Every structure is written in structure tokens, then in C-alpha cells.
Image (cartoon, grey):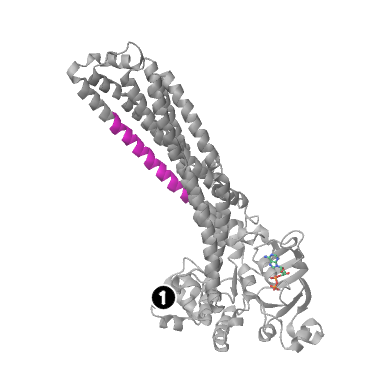
């Protein structure tokens, strides 16, 4: 519960207000129950005992004329009940709004930290876990906050009632405490496993989340391989396991109710016996019993909420761990604004590996990428091309060496400012399920409609966009499902045109296009990239031959650098590739391109 309060980071005034209102409601309810003593006294006309609460009531009410005692007490009772409900309602409303605010703050924090910490690049981390933490566990923290308030309030209510019961009769109270303690012990033993089951539920929920995420992303693959029933069975299996665990938790949650009811029935019998033996009056016994009856609800709620909170412990822990893991931004943030790249980007003896102990993905790479020219990177799959891109984008910092732009190390620049100078286009176009216009405008959120249309024209996309049913207002579907590969590429190019980067990074975007689409795209691209700094991962000979400089990577090391004609004549590795008539044996795996 302490962790929940810390995570929810509710302002102190709000917690204080919720607890005071709840405490006030408990006090008012207790007082209203005690008012039954004079009412019952007036009924039976029992002689007021000299001492105790009965005597005190008799003395206090002696100022009220005899026939007005009942209406006066009833009016007071009504007033107390109304005041109690008003306080309880205000407390509940505040608590609900606190829950909502806590959930909202947590979601925003988790999302912000997920973005800034690049947790998805960390080895061993699954993207579906982020979704799970964000979509599910953050809600649970908010719910647990509400339950924690209820637990504290129930405890306060029980305390108020217990004090009043003690004021009525100490012996009766002792008997009640004894029975309650036995009941609580039984319940504790029966529900002790809630926390461990909660942990299993969270683990299974994560597995379920991963499964859902993967299956939804691979719907087409599943269908093409005819694996619908196999996947449906697997899905049903995971879902069924989760259902069983949740049922188990629910069963535990139901334990406190019946146990405490049985205990109370036994207790009432015992109390009547004890009252008969001592000098407790009928009115006091009735008030005591009604307090005892009313105490059951908060007692049961307290225990059930405790079981629920224990069950949520793992989910709350997951949110805490996520926030802790992602507290530090993944990369140190610079302070300078990145100016336009004037002379070029340089790598100085750069080595990089994804984790300590893993093989080097890049080793001792020194390289100059001159501004205003096209540099083609060639090499087999696994040679380190995507890693080089990731370092240029500063998705990672080099393990050794440094990358500079016009002599300034990249880590001196604000990340966003540096990345705004670059733009990446690959075969794998990411489009939002939004309108064509919104997808292009993503390149510059302040762009006017005219600017968007102009960018589409530069990208040779205007004609086909205008032919779409709603033109620029057409929604492209998930990942641009409604568009062809070539159309998607041209929308991505329009987005890049609007962004107007200094450095254009291309991961051979036309590789997956048919000849005609590729040509339309290539023409637009060539015009746009003219005189711009371009770095292209090249798979096609034509791309390499039109570059100003070729860098041949192999096993993370630079083998050759120079203009293509020079390298062909040099008789080295590139000349060999040229002879073979191709520049790389395999296209880049798409998932690598995603990893960027
Ligand atoms: P290319 O783009 O030329 O195919 P990469 O840069 O993707 O090559 O990979 C270079 C090396 O780094 C390979 O050995 C690959 O297995 C490894 N690698 C790439 N991405 C990761 C990653 N996210 N975590 C660990 N190793 C990686």
C-alpha cells in the first residue's frame, strides 16, 4: 500500500481531505447508532441505570419536555444520517477523482519515459510489455489507490465503532474482540496466497499480452500459412490459463464474507449470554448489537480489499519497476542546437556492440560522409550497415570512438535537434491509421495545407492522392493497408520532403517495389536529394554506381572507401562484387529495418 501511495503521488491535501471526510462519516454514523439508546429507553420506559451511556443520555435529554423526546431524537438522528451521507459522498467523489488523476499522471509518465528511455532497444525487453504496463497495470495502480483509501477508512470506521462499543460496555467489547480476532486469523490463513497468485497473474498477463501483440501483427502470416486453428488453440490455451488464475483470486476474495458472518452469529449468542450475566441494560445491548452489526460491513470490506490489493501487488510492482528502469534517459541529452551540416559527418575510430560481452557490430570504423554528396554503404547482411545508421541517428552512442558533425560530437546536441536534421526512408514504411494529409503533415506539424500539397507534388504523389475517394482526407488504414507499396513510399517521401532534412538516410526503399513504381519513386527522390547529403544502404548496383562514394563494410569493419569507378578498377572486394553483378547477397531483413 505504501508503494501504491508513492506511485500515485497524490497531493497531501487530497489524501488528507479524503481521509478526514471518511473519518467524519464514520463518526457521524457511530453517533447516529448510539442515538438508538434514548429511543429504546423511551419505548420500554426502563429505569435509566445511574452510570454508563444510558444514564448520560437520560441526564442530557432531561431538558427536553417528556413528550418531545422521541421527535427530538428522531430529528437529530435524521440530521446525523444526512450529514454522514453528505460526508461519505464527498469523500467518495474526491477518492474517485484522485484515482482518475493518478491513472492519468501515471499513463503520461510511463509513455513519456518509454519514449525518452528507448526501452525498446534494450536487450531482453519486449514491446508488448510496454503496452501491458501502460494499458493495464497503470489502471491497477489507480484502482489500488482507491482501495487503499477504502482500507484506511474502513480501519478508521472500525476504530470509531470500537471506541463507542467500549463506551457502552467493556466486557461485551472484550468478548467481541476475541471472536473477531479468531475470525481474522481464519481469513488470513485462507487468503494468504493472494499475493503469490497475483504474481502469477501478472506474469501470465504479460505472456498473454505478448501473444496478442504478436498474433495481431502477424494476422496475414497466420492466414497465408493456414495456421488459423493452431493459433486459435494456442490463444485459447493462454486465455484459459489466465481465466483460471483470475477465478482463483476471485474465490479468495469471497472467503472473508461468509467467515465473518458465521463468526458474528456466534458472537451475538455469546454477547446475549454475557449481557445476561452483567448489568448491561437492554437499550445499551441493542445499541451495542447494532454497532456490531454495522461494523461488519467495513470489516468485511477491509479484508476483501486487502486481498484484492495483495493480488494487485505484482502489477503495482511492475509499474514501479518500469518507472525505475526508464527513469534515466537512454542517452545523455546535449544542450546545443544542431546547426545545418556544413562540411560533413565523421566517424572517428568508432566501435560498437549492443551489450557488454557481445561481439562487435562495428569495429574501429573511421569514415567521412561529405555534405552534399551521396555515400553508398554496401555489405552482406550482418555487416553492420543498420548499426551504422543507428549511430548516425544517435539511437545508440558508440562504445568506443566518436561521431562528429562538422567537428562537433553528436552528444553535444539536443537529441531532438540533431535528429530533426536527418530523415530515414526504408522499405518498411510506417504510416498511422489516419488521413493521407495527417500522415504527410507528420513531417512538420505546423505545415499549412498548401505546404502538404506541395510536398506531395515533389514526391510525385499528388495525382494518385487526388484520385483516392476522399483525396487528402482518405484514411489510409492500418499501416497504410489501403495503398500500394509504391504509393506508401511516395507518401513517406512527401513526409520527408516536408521535413526537409539536411541528411537523407535511405535503406534502399525501392527494393520491394515493382519496376514501374520504383522508377516513379526514384525520379522524385533523385530530384529531391540533389545536392543533399545522402547516405544509402545499397542493394542494387545502379544505386551504388550513381553514388559519389562507396563504403564497403564487412564483419563490422570498413574494407574499402572511394568513388565507385576507382574501386572497380582497384581489384578489391567491391570489384569482386561488381563482377558478380550484385552488391549484396541478401536484402536487409525487415525486422532490422524496424529496429531502427
Ligand atoms: P546489417 O544491417 O548490415 O545487416 P546490422 O547492423 O543489423 O547488420 O548487424 C550487425 C551485427 O550486430 C550483427 O551481428 C547483428 O546480429 C548484431 N545486431 C544487430 N542488431 C542488434 C541488436 N538489437 N541487439 C544485438 N545485436 C544486434
Q: Residue 218, can we see it?
A: no
Give coordinates of residue 232: x percent, y percent. Answer: 52, 69
Q: Element under label 1?
A: loop
Ligand 1 image-quadrant field = bottom right
The residue indicated by pointer 1 is 474
> Which picture quadrant has residue 54?
top left
The answer to whether residue 39 is left or right of residue 524 is left
The answer to whether residue 191 is left or right of residue 546 is left
Quadrant for the C terminus, please. Answer: bottom right
Give coordinates of residue 132: x percent, y percent. Answer: 53, 57
Q: Residue at x 50, y 42 (%)?
A: 307
Give coordinates of residue 372: x percent, y percent. Answer: 65, 76
Q: Residue at x 54, y 54 (%)?
A: 133
Q: Residues within 10 Å of mark 1 (few under 14, many from 20)?
A: some
Above or below 432: residue 282: above
Q: Residue furthest left?
A: 67
Between 464 and 413, which is closer to the camera in this rendering? Answer: 464
Between 382 and 286, which is closer to the camera in this rendering? Answer: 286
Q: Residue 468, can we see it?
A: yes
> Which picture quadrant has residue 365?
bottom right
Q: Residue at x 47, y 37 (%)?
A: 12
Q: How many marks?
A: 1
Above or below 374: residue 90: above
Q: Main secondary structure of the magenta part?
A: helix
Between 560 and 69, which is closer to the camera in this rendering? Answer: 69
Please give the range of residues in magenta: 80-104
Give coordinates of residue 306: x percent, y percent. Answer: 49, 40
The answer to whether residue 161 is left or right of residue 547 is left
Q: Is residue 246 magenta?
A: no
Q: Residue furthest top?
A: 50
Q: Residue at x 37, y 18 (%)?
A: 276
Amino acid at each position: 500500500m505504501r508503494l501504491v501511495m508513492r506511485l500515485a503521488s497524490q497531493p497531501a491535501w487530497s489524501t488528507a481531505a479524503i481521509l478526514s471526510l471518511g473519518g467524519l462519516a464514520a463518526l457521524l454514523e457511530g453517533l447516529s447508532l448510539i442515538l438508538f439508546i434514548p429511543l429504546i429507553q423511551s419505548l420500554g420506559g426502563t429505569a435509566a441505570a445511574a452510570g454508563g451511556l444510558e444514564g448520560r443520555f437520560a441526564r442530557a435529554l432531561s431538558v427536553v419536555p417528556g413528550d418531545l423526546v422521541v421527535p427530538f431524537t428522531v430529528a437529530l438522528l435524521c440530521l446525523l444520517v444526512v450529514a454522514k451521507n453528505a460526508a461519505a459522498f464527498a469523500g467518495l467523489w474526491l477518492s474517485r477523482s484522485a484515482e482518475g488523476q493518478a491513472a492519468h499522471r501515471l499513463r503520461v509518465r510511463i509513455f513519456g519515459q518509454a519514449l525518452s528511455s528507448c526501452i525498446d532497444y534494450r536487450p531482453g525487453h519486449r514491446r508488448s510489455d510496454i503496452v501491458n504496463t501502460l494499458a493495464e497495470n497503470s489502471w491497477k495502480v489507480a484502482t489500488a489507490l482507491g482501495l487503499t483509501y477504502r482500507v484506511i477508512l474502513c480501519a478508521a470506521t472500525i476504530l470509531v465503532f470500537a471506541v463507542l462499543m467500549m463506551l457502552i460496555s467493556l466486557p461485551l467489547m472484550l468478548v467481541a474482540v476475541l471472536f473477531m480476532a479468531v475470525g481474522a486469523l481464519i481469513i488470513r490463513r485462507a487468503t494468504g496466497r493472494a499475493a503469490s497468485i497475483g504474481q502469477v497473474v501478472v506474469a501470465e498477463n504479460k505472456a498473454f499480452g505478448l501473444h496478442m501483440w504478436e498474433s495481431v501483427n502477424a494476422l496475414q502470416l497466420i492466414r497465408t500459412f493456414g495456421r488459423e486453428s493452431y493459433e486459435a488453440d494456442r490463444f485459447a490455451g493462454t486465455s484459459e490459463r489466465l481465466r483460471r488464475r483470475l477465478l482463483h483470486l476471485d474465490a479468495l476474495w469471497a472467503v472473508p464474507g461468509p467467515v465473518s458472518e458465521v463468526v458474528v452469529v456466534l458472537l451475538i449468542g455469546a454477547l446475549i449470554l454475557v449481557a445476561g450475566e452483567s448489568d448491561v441494560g437492554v437499550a445499551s445491548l441493542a445499541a451495542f448489537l447494532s454497532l456490531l452489526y454495522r461494523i461488519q460491513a467495513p470489516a468485511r470490506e477491509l479484508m476483501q480489499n486487502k486481498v484484492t490489493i495483495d493480488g494487485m501487488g505484482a502489477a503495482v510492482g511492475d509499474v514501479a519497476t518500469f518507472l525505475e528502469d526508464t527513469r534515466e534517459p537512454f542517452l545523455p541529452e546535449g544542450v546545443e542546437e544542431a546547426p545545418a551540416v556544413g562540411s560533413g559527418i565523421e566517424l572517428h575510430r568508432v566501435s560498437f556492440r549492443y551489450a557488454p560481452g557481445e561481439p562487435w557490430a562495428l569495429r574501429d570504423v573511421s569514415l567521412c560522409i561529405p555534405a552534399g554528396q551521396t555515400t553508398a554503404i554496401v555489405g552482406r547482411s550482418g555487416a553492420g550497415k543498420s548499426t551504422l545508421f543507428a549511430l548516425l541517428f544517435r539511437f545508440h552512442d558508440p562504445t568506443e570512438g566518436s561521431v562528429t558533425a562538422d567537428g562537433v560530437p553528436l552528444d553535444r546536441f539536443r537529441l531532438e535537434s540533431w535528429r530533426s536534421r536527418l530523415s530515414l526512408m526504408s522499405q518498411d514504411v510506417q504510416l498511422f491509421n489516419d488521413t493521407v494529409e495527417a500522415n504527410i503533415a507528420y513531417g512538420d506539424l505546423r505545415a499549412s495545407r498548401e505546404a502538404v500539397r506541395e510536398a506531395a507534388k515533389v514526391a510525385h504523389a499528388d495525382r494518385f492522392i487526388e484520385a483516392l475517394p476522399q483525396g487528402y482526407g482518405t484514411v489510409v488504414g492500418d499501416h497504410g493497408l489501403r495503398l500500394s507499396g509504391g504509393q506508401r513510399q511516395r507518401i513517406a517521401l512527401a513526409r520527408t520532403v516536408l521535413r526537409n532534412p539536411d541528411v537523407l538516410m535511405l535503406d534502399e526503399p525501392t527494393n520491394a517495389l515493382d519496376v514501374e513504381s520504383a522508377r516513379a519513386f526514384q525520379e522524385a527522390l533523385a530530384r529531391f536529394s540533389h545536392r543533399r547529403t545522402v547516405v544509402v544502404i545499397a542493394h542494387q548496383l545502379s544505386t551504388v554506381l550513381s553514388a559519389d562514394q562507396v563504403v564497403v563494410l564487412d564483419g563490422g569493419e570498413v574494407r574499402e572507401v572511394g568513388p565507385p569507378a576507382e574501386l572497380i578498377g582497384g581489384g578489391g572486394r567491391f570489384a569482386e562484387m561488381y563482377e558478380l553483378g550484385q552488391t549484396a547477397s541478401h536484402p536487409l531483413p525487415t525486422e532490422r529495418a524496424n529496429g531502427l
